[in-house]
Image (tube, rainbow, N blue to C red):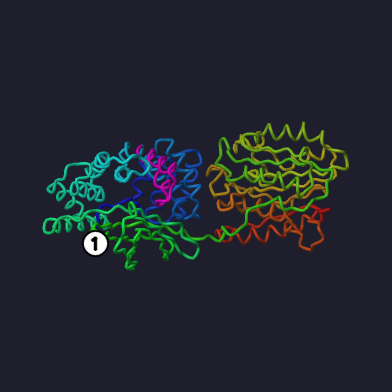
Amino acid sequence: MRVSMYKKIVVVSAGIVAAMYSHNGIAGYLESKSAFMRQDYKDAYEQCIQAANIGNPECLNAIGYLYQKGLGVAINLDEANRLFSLAADKNNAGAQYNLAMSLQASGQGSAVDLQKSAKWMLKAAESKNVSAQVNLGTMYSEGKGVEANPSKAVYWWKKAADQGNAMAQNNLGWAYLNGRGVSADQSLAREWLEKAARQAGDDEARTLALNNLKLMRLNKEFGAPKEMVMDVYPGKPDASGKVILTIASENKTPIRLLKVGDKDIGPSSTGTYSITRYVPVGETQIEIYAEGQSGAIYNQHILVRRDMVSGSNALPELDPTKIPSSVRRDAVAIVIGAEGYEMLPRADFSDHDARSFYDYANKSLGVDAQKIKLLSGSSAKRKDILLALRNWLPAEINQGKTEVIIFYSGHGLASADGKKRYLLPLDANVDLLEDTAIAHDSLIKIINGYQPKSITLVMDSCYSGVTKTGKPLLTAARPIAIYSENENIPQNTTILSAASGSQISISSAEIGHGLFSYFIMRGLEGEADLNKDQKITAQELHAYASERVTKEAQRKGVQQNPAISGAYQKVISAQK
C-alpha cells in the first residue's frame, strides 16, 4: 500500500510572488508588481530593471526570478543567481530563499552548493520567510547541507506551521506521527495533519496530509509499516526530454517492488536502479514508490525541471584563436567598454565586448598588441578616454601612414537638436552633455589633427535616449531628437554603427555581448569575407553583421538595423 510521509523540498512557483516583492516604495516597483500579477512578465521586467541596475534589492530579486523561470526574458540561471546574490547580500529574505533553492539545483547540487544553500536558507528563515523555514526544516531532517538534526527540523517546521503553511503543518504532523525530532504523539499528529488537510490553497500538502491521516488509521488497525531510506537523483534532461533517474536503497537493501510514476520497474537484489524516462518542458513531479523485502515502504515525489532551448543559444561562442594570420599593418587601436555607469543604468556586457575585441584588433585587424589601448572596467571615464586620445595616441601615429581604429561599446545620446552624437563615458551626466560626454565630431577632429592615413569607428551604441534594455536615459521632460544619418564626415573616415536613427542597440544575455559587437567579431573571424578574396572590407563587414543583427533583434521583438557611412571599400582585415 502506498503512503506519503512528508514533502522533501517545497518548490514555490506562484507563491514566490509574496517573497519576491516587498512593500518598499521604489520607482517602477508598484507597476512591476502589478504587471507580474497580470502575468505581463515583459512589462514587469521593464518596470523594475532600472531600479535593479542601481541596486534596489527588491527589483534585483524580481529580475533574478524572471531570469530563473524564463518569464518575459530568456532563461539565464547564471544571471539569476548573480542578481539573487546581490539582493541576498542586502538582506532581502526573498532573494536569500531563491538563491538557496537555486543552489540545490533540484537535488543535484554539490556538497559545497548544499552548504551554501543551507547558509542562505537559514538567513531567510531567520528573517521569517515561511518558505525558507519549511525547507530548512526538511534540510535538517535529511541532513542536506547541514548535519541531520530532527529536533531542528521540527523547530523550523513549527515556525512555518504556526504561520499557516500547509506543507509545514503536514511535515510537523508526520514528525509527531513517527516520533522524529519529538516524542510520538498521535493526538498532535492528527491535529497538525487535519489543519493541513483543511487548507484549499496547497493541493500537494493537502494530499500528503490526507495520506498521512490514512496511514494513521492503517497503523491503528494493522501496525505501522517501517519507512525505507532511499536516495533518488534525477540527472539533467537532454534536449529531447530524456532524463536518467539514479535510485539506490540504503546499504543496498533488496527491493521487491519499485514503481516510477505508473510504470512498474520490478525488483532489484541490490536495491539500485538507473531508469530513463521522458519529461516535457517545465517542471515535472515524478512519484517514486518502493517496497523492501521486510515490508518497509518508500513513497516520495521528486521534481525534475527541463528548460526550453532558446534559438539564441544556438549561436556559437566567439573564438579569435581560429583567425588566420593577418597582415601586420601600421595601425593603432583604442578599445572602449563603458558598462558600470555612475549616474546611468548599466550598459550590459559592454566590458565583455571591449575585452573580447582586443583580441580581434590584434589577430584580425593586424594591430600590434602594444599599440592597442584597452579602456574598460573603471578606466572608461571621460578623462581616461581624453588622455588616451590626446597623450597616448599621437605618439603611436606616423603621419599619413597609420590607420586608427576606435571600438566603443556603451551608451550614446544625440543632442537636443539632433545634430550631434555623443559617446557617454562612465561619469557622463546627460544634463551636462557637452561637458561630460564626447561628441563624435570632436573625436574625429582630435584624431585627424594627428594626420593619420585613415580612421575606422566601430560603435556599438545607439542615440535614441534609451539603454540597451529599453530604459530611458533622459527625464520625461526632455525631448529626444534623433540625429541625421547624412552627417558630413571626412573622406578618410569609416563609421560602422550598431543601429539606425531612433533604434535601440540591444544586448543578449544568452551570448553575453551586444548583438552588433558579437556579429562584428564573428565576421572578423573570416565569415564576413563574402567574396573569399582573403580581405574583409567595411562594406562586407557591414553586410554580414547587418543581416544577422536584424534577424536576431527581430526574434527579440526589436528593430535594429546597423548602419555604415564613409569609405565603404576600406579594407578592415586582410590575411597574409
Q: Position of residue 289 (x, y in %)?
A: 29, 61
Q: Main secondary structure of the magenta part?
A: helix
Report if residue 108 lies within the magenta region.
Answer: yes
Q: Residue at (72%, 57%) from the top-left corner?
A: 542
Residue at the front extreme? Answer: 269
Residue at the right extreme? Answer: 400
The answer to whether residue 352 is left or right of residue 63 is right
Depth check: give the residue in front, 392 or 121. 121
| Amino acid at circle 1 | Arg
Report if residue 449 lies within the magenta region.
Answer: no
Q: Which residue is mark 1?
A: 2
**Image quadrant in which you'd find residue 536:** bottom right
Q: Residue at (50%, 38%) from the top-left corner?
A: 54
**Image quadrant in which you'd find residue 25:** top left
Q: Magenta segment, which residues?
A: 100-122
Q: Position of residue 361 (x, y in %)?
A: 74, 46
Q: Position of residue 110 (x, y in %)?
A: 44, 46
Q: Residue at (79%, 44%) from the top-left corner?
A: 367
- Classify 10 Å Cα crowding around label 1: few (below 14), some (14-19), many (20 and above): few
Quadrant the N terminus occupies: bottom left
Q: Residue at (55%, 58%) from the top-left corner?
A: 556
Depth check: give the residue in front, 414 or 456. 456
Depth check: give the residue in front, 410 or 332. 332
The answer to whether residue 506 is left or right of residue 274 is right
**Image quadrant in which you'd find residue 399:** top right
